[in-house]
Amino acid sequence: MQSITLLGYALLGLLHGKASSGYDLRKTFTETPMGRFSDSPGAIYPALRRLEERKLITESAIVQPTKRRRKALQITPEGRVASKAWLRRPLERADVTSHMTTLMLKFAFMDGVLGEAATLRFLCSFQQELNAYIPSLASYIRAESGRLPRSGQLALESGWRGYRAQAQWVAHAISVYGGTAK
Amino acid sequence: MQSITLLGYALLGLLHGKASSGYDLRKTFTETPMGRFSDSPGAIYPALRRLEERKLITESAIVQPTKRRRKALQITPEGRVASKAWLRRPLERADVTSHMTTLMLKFAFMDGVLGEAATLRFLCSFQQELNAYIPSLASYIRAESGRLPRSGQLALESGWRGYRAQAQWVAHAISVYGGTAK
DNA sequence: TGAATCATGTAATAGGTTACATGATTCT
DNA sequence: AGAATCATGTAACCTATTACATGATTCA
């Protein structure tokens, strides 16, 4: 059994809210700064078909009064289970170091699907991992700074600044969710 | 003629400096926080073969005194041309909004390959694009903030903070390169 | 009526992931 | 001598990209 791709989880996350057509979902990707998924039909329609084959989504039975041809898709109970299981997967170090966009995608859906408490827990472990990683990256940069050319050093610094900004954001988000920051 | 992949350009960039084996290049990806490329042999060796087929790299004739079997690869003049052409490609809006890692990869190699002046020019257009994009993202967030759930709003904000951090970095980098920031 | 957009799809291609394979050399 | 690591590769599979195809409907 092939595992669900990130695009698949993104689609499931969007369908948690309301039944949508492939076209609707495509528009979400084109019109919003969401996740940077491809809005090409060659990516989305096959992805939807795969989800349908696994019975994680189905064609909505509701007849829409619109004139246009439209295949509305809705998430099934199994789909919700799969999506929730993904959202609940514990966060690991590697997620922070190389899959930040995935983490943000998870976060964006988490509140609506798992609720406030789970989201707050997620943010706290996110913060923990960031607080562990940032100093280690900093010391790596300090150690390498001699060996690296100026541009390589600056490139690393850019990464470091990015993580710091993310850490500040997490602290902010935690406070928004009513947690105790830091 | 297929275009060169990002991994291909990364390999060319590394080979600008000195001839290396596939194993050396792999280690660079595993051991440094560089670009987040896969260090799997299934990615790197085929990529190297493709570059070799296009005569952008060749097996180094220099016989190394090491005992171990080792295939050292060096960049050819054509390879340098291709790499430089890529590094010189003018920066577009889409690069900033969805290919930041590519831009940082370019930057990391640019100094050594194209020189200081070109790098400074690159940084300035980078700054220009960021300064144009950040406010537009901010106003998008402001406009959508009502319609979006809390988590969606925060996710967008995270993106915004990331771009701001990048802008601060660019200003810093420009000053390091002796340009007049902002 | 013609153009644009809505809306869903397919086909060819190619690159990455995962897993496997192989043998030499260094280390203990 | 056996284990770990060096070092290079291959094969199956799958997904995304790109381009094309199709027809209906709204708009000017």
Image: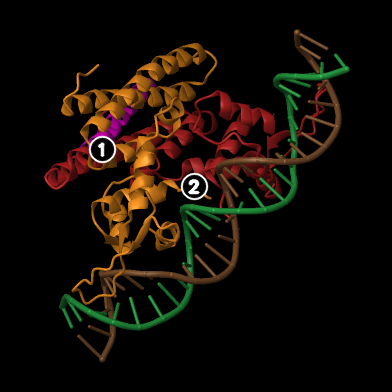
Chain colours: A red, B orange, C green, D brown
Q: Is disc 1 in the same subunit as disc 2?
A: no
Letter of the chain that mark 1 sits on in the rendering = A
Decide which of B77, B2 is in the foreground and name it.
B77
Which residue is pictured at 21% across the width and 71% down the height?
Answer: B64
How far across and down, in percent of the image, does residue A88 sit? 47, 42
State whether residue A127 is above or below residue C21: above
Q: Which tag is nearer the camera, tag 1 or tag 2?
A: 2
Which amino acid, mark 2? Answer: Ser
Q: Secondary structure at mark 1?
A: helix
The vertical placement of D4 against B178, above or below, is below
| Count of number-bearing discs | 2
Query: Where is A137 relative to B130, above or below?
Result: below
State the residue at coordinates (40%, 51%).
B8
Which amino acid is tagged 1?
Ala
* In the image: residue D24, left or right of residue A92: right
What is the spatial separation of the Cα atoms under label 1 and label 2, in whole angstroms? 25 Å
Is residue A181 among what the camera can see? no
Q: Secondary structure at mark 2?
A: loop
Specify few, some or many for label 2: CA neighbours under 10 Å numbering under 14, 14-19, or 20 or more. Answer: few
Which stretch is magenta?
A154-181
**Magenta residues: mostly which secondary structure?**
helix
Q: Quadrant of the C terminus of chain A?
A: top left
Front residue of A8/B28: it is: B28
Q: Classify residue A60 as left or right of residue B172.
A: right
Indicate left or right for A14 with A49 as reference.
left
Residue under the image location 30 percent in, 55 percent down: B30
Identify the chain of the residue marked 2, using the numbered disc in the image.
B
Q: Nearer the viewer, residue C13 or C21?
A: C13
Q: Which residue is mark 2?
A: B3
Residue at the image point whose x is 63% and y is 31% from the top: A25
Residue assigned mark 1: A155
Residue A172 in the image: x percent, y percent?
A: 33, 23
